[in-house]
Image (spheres, rainbow, N blue to C red):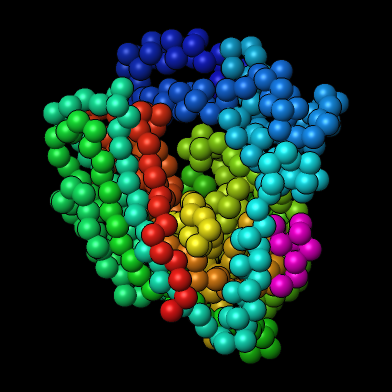
Amino acid sequence: MKLKWNGQFDLMKEMIDLRIKKDIPALLKKRLILEKNILDDLKREFIYSKAEAIGILKEKIIDFQDDEFDELFKDGAFEFLFIEGEMKFKNDFYENLIKTRNAYALRNKEKVNYQNYELLDEVITKMELQGELSYKIHVKVSLKIKKEYEKIGKVIRVWLPIPKEYAQVEQFHIIRTMPDAQVINDHQAEHRSVYFETCLEPDQEFSVEYEFINHSYYHQLDPHIVTEEHPDCCLEEKAPHIVFSPYLKSLVNDIIGKEKNPLIKAKKIYDYITSHVMYSFVRQYVTLPLIPEYVAAGLKGDCGVQAILFITMCRIAGIPATWQAGLYATPYEIGNHDWARFYIAPYGWLYADCSFGGSAYRHHSKLRRDFYFGNLEPFRIPSACEFQGDLVPSKTYLRRDPYDHQTGEVEYIDECIPQDHYEMKQMIIEVKEV
C-alpha cells in the first residue's frame, strides 16, 4: 500500500507476482491479484501532467491563469495521483470543473446548456400540482469490442442492464435484442440484465432495446403523521462499504442530535450532505476505500458515493435505506446515475437524490432541493436495487463495477477484457409524457 500511494506501480506489481507464488492464504492471494487490476484502472484514469492540465484549461476557459490552477488544487477541485514519481490528473478533470464550479462554467468558451434545469423545474412544478406524472421511456443500450481487440471465434459473455419491474417501473417490455439473448433476468434479480454468450463475430454489436412507463408520485411530507414503524430490513452493515465506523456514527450523532422523528432525522442527513459535499467525479468505485467515510472526510464525490453515504448514515440512525441506480434519461440527455431510497411510515419507500439536491443548493433552487428529498421525477431507469448486488449468471472475472450495474459487463470465457478494449453506447429513442 505504501508503494501504491507513492505511485510505484511497476515495483508493486513485481512484488505482488513474487508474493502470490508463495504459500499464502487464498483470500490474501485474491486481494493481491485484485490490487494488480486496480493499478491498471488507475493508470487508465489518471493521464494528465500538471502542465498538460493547465494547457487544457487555458485552451478552454477564457483568461485562465497558472495561479488559478494552484488555488483550485488547494481547494480540492482536482483528483490526482502520483504515478512513477509524477503527479497525474484524472482524465475528466476539466469536465468536472465546469460541472461543479459555476464561475468557470460561465468563462467556458463552449456554451453551457441549462435546458435540463428548465425541464426539471417544469416537471417538478407539474408533479406538485397533479400529484403524479408518467413518462414513456424508450432506449437502446449496446456494447461492442473495439476492432483492434477483437478475438474472433472466442466465446464471449455480455451482460446489459435492463429496468427492474418494481417501484416506479410499469409496462416494461423488451423490443429486441441483438443477437438473441441466452438469459433475460426476471424482476427478482438485484442487478437485472439480458445475458449473451456466443462466439465473437467480426464487428459484432450486442444490444437491447426496451421501453417502459415511469410512473412517479409526489409526496408532500408531513412529520406530524410519521410513526416509527418500519420493515426489518435495509438496516444492517454490508462490508466493505456500508460499515458503521466510529467516525460515521459520530457524524450522524452530530447531525441529528436528540431528534427522534425518522423523517426529520433523514432530512437532517440529506440537508447536511447536500450542503457540505461538493459534487465531484471520482475514480472507479473499486479503487476507493471505505466509501461513506471517504466522502464524509473528503466532502466531495459523485452521485453514487453520496447515495452510499446517505444510506449508511440513515441505517446508523435506525432508518431503513437502500440503493436504486441505473440511467437518467430525458429528451435531452442520457447517462449513468445513482440515488437512494429510504422508508418512512406511513408513506412507505421514499427517494433521496443527494447529488441533484446538492446541485440545487449550489444553484439556489429551493424548488429542486426540497423536491429531491422524498421524490424523484419520472426520468429514471432503475436496473439495480442493491449496492454490490449479483449478476445472473455470475461473472468469472473482476467486474468493471462490482457495486453498480449501469453500462454493462463483458468477458471472454477464459479471460478478463479490460475496459478500454470495448465501448458502450446509450441511445434515447423516445422520452415523452403519457
What residue span does the magenta drawing correspond to? Answer: 358-367
Q: Residue at x 68, y 41 (%)?
A: 110
Position of 10 relative to 318 (above/below): above
**Image coords of residue 241 (percent x, y):** 52, 47
Q: Is residue 309 visible?
A: no
| Front residue (pair 156, 98) | 98
- Residue 91 sits in quarter: top right
**Image coords of residue 258 (percent x, y):** 75, 71
The furthest residue to the bottom: 225
Q: Tell whether 179 sits left or right of 12.
A: left
- Is 338 part of what is drawn in magenta? no
Q: Residue at x 56, y 36 (%)?
A: 283
Q: Tell whether 19 sits left or right of 343.
A: left
Q: Is residue 378 visible?
A: yes
**Image coords of residue 416 (percent x, y):** 30, 29
Q: Residue at x 21, y 25 (%)?
A: 151
- Residue 21 sits in quarter: top left
- Is 360 part of what is drawn in magenta? yes
Quarter occupied by the N terminus: top right
| Front residue (pair 240, 114) | 114
**Image coords of residue 98 (percent x, y):** 70, 43
Chief SS of the magenta region? helix
Number of numbered callouts drawn: 0
Q: Tell whether 317 sits left or right of 173.
A: right
| Front residue (pair 230, 124) | 124
Q: Residue at x 76, y 59 (%)?
A: 363
Quarter occupied by the C terminus: bottom left
